[in-house]
């Protein structure tokens, strides 16, 4: 058995792959961190996101969504002037706006996790063919969630970004079939096998 090929890029990727990627998330703070990092990553490399993760946590109050939702213009200026932070006012503003939308979803559904896991029936999805390397960049599920989140006011949540988020937070298990992480997730969490869903490659 061997890890997914991308996990061998460097030590940061290996640790992320082995301990986080694809592990089902049911904690709203952790879910908000995953979602925010995917939004911040748009147009950049994930490797860079991992390198700057501590900076992001410093800037966004450890991804405490209630604290972030209360940020104002002074906080935006502070964040953009933080050493090592990516210089994108639009992305910083999007994370803050998303925190406010996040609060609204929590008020309606009880938790953001309940909302987003509801699209998958509360189970990790195993799409046929994905475990053998046939992974898309987006699919029907990510498109449906993206459309709903955009209606709710979320920013930087296109189908590709949402597909990456679903992989990261364990709603979709896209580890290789031979990867120990794939086997561990299947053994420890409820899963459902589905046919491919209007996939885009």
Image (tube, rainbow, N blue to C red):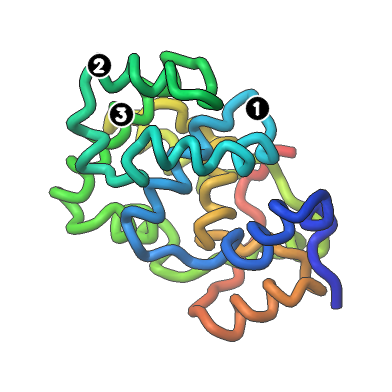
Quarter of the picture containing the N terminus is bottom right
Identify the mark nearer the N-term, 2 or 3: 2
Label 1 vs 2, first from the N-terminus: 1
Task: Report the residue at 59% width, 62% height from top.
Answer: 22
3D distance between C-alphas at marks 2 and 3: 12 Å
Circle 1 crowding by C-alpha within 10 Å: few under 14, some 14–19, many from 20 = few
For this view, does 40 lie left or right of residue 176? left
In the picture provided, is 186 more to the left or to the right than 72? Answer: right
User: Which SS class for mark 2?
Assistant: helix
Instruction: Read off the residue under disc 3.
Output: 96
Q: Is residue 48 above or below residue 145?
A: above
Mark 3 lies on a secondary structure that is helix
Q: Which residue is mark 2?
A: 74
| 199 on left or right of 119 | right
Q: Earlier in the sequence, mark 3 or mark 1?
A: 1
User: Crowding at label 3, few (<14), some or many (≥20) Cα neighbours within 10 Å?
Assistant: many
The one nearer the camera, 78 or 66, is 78
Please say if 105 is above or below 89. Answer: below
Residue 158, horizontal then vertical, whole percent: 50, 30
Q: Which mark is residue 44?
A: 1
């Amino acid at each position: 058995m061997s890890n997914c090929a991308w996990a061998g890029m460097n030590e940061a990727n290996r640790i992320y792959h082995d301990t986080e990627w694809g592990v089902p998330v049911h904690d709203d703070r952790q879910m908000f961190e995953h979602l925010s990092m995917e939004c911040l990553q748009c147009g950049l490399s994930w490797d860079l996101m991992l390198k700057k993760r501590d900076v992001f946590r410093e800037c966004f109050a450890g991804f405490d969504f209630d604290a972030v939702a209360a940020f104002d213009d002074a906080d935006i200026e502070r964040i953009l002037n933080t050493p090592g932070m990516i210089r994108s006012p639009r992305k910083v503003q999007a994370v803050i706006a998303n925190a406010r939308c996040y609060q609204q979803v929590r008020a309606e559904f009880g938790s953001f996790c309940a909302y987003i896991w509801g699209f998958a029936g509360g189970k990790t999805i195993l799409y046929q063919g994905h475990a053998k390397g046939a992974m898309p960049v987006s699919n029907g599920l990510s498109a449906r969630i993206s459309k709903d989140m955009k209606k709710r006011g979320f920013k930087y949540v296109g189908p590709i970004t949402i597909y990456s988020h679903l992989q990261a937070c364990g709603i979709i298990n896209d580890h290789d079939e031979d990867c120990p992480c794939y086997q561990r997730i299947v053994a420890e969490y409820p899963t459902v096998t589905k046919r491919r869903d209007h996939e885009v490659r």
